Image (cartoon, rainbow, N blue to C red):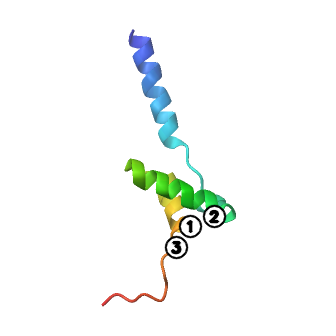
Amino acid sequence: MKIKFIFMIFIFILMGCEHKSEEYYKAHPEEARKRSLECRHNAIISLDCVNAYKVGFPRDENLTQE
């Protein structure tokens, strides 16, 4: 039982560490948009989601903060 619990924790840690770079998403913009929408829908905050969001929904540089 204890080994099973430790194994499950290990799997969750590995799953959380898996992410794609911003450069990857720049090469695959449709996947970036799809992943960022998935993250938003499931309320996931991870490095993978941040990278996907940066490419999938780029900030409009013409906007100014007032």
Name which residue lies at 46% across and 32% down.
12
Amino acid type at circle 2 is Pro
Disc 2 target residue? 29
Residue placed under numbered mark 1 in the picture: 55
CB atoms of marks 3 and 1 within 8 Å:
yes
Q: Say whether marks 1 and 2 touch (CB < 8 Å).
A: yes
Picture coordinates of residue 26, whole percent (x, y): 64, 65
Tell me which corner region of the image, top left, top right, bottom left or bottom right, holds residue 30.
bottom right
Give the residue pinned by disc 3: 58
- For the residue carrying disc 2, how many other residues have a C-alpha within 10 Å: few (<14), some (14-19), or many (20+)? some
Instruction: Answer yes or no: is residue 44 visible.
Output: no
Q: Residue at the location (39% across, 89% down)?
A: 64
| Residue 54 x/y as whole percent | 51, 67
Rendered position, 62 above or below 16: below
Above or below, 56 relative to 43 = below
The residues bearing labels 1 and 2 have C-alpha atoms spaced at a distance of 7 Å
Q: Residue at x 58, y 59 (%)?
A: 32
Amino acid type for the residue under numbered disc 1: Val
Q: Is 2 displayed left or right of 55 in the figure?
A: left
Q: Position of residue 25 (x, y in %)?
A: 62, 60
User: In the drawing, what numbered circle is on residue 31?
Assistant: none
State the SS at label 2. Answer: helix
Which comes before the other along the chain, label 1 or label 2? 2
Q: What is the distance, in whole Å, between disc 3 and disc 1 at their CAs? A: 5 Å
- Seen at 38% across and 12% down, the residue is 2
Dot 2 or dot 3, earlier in sequence: 2
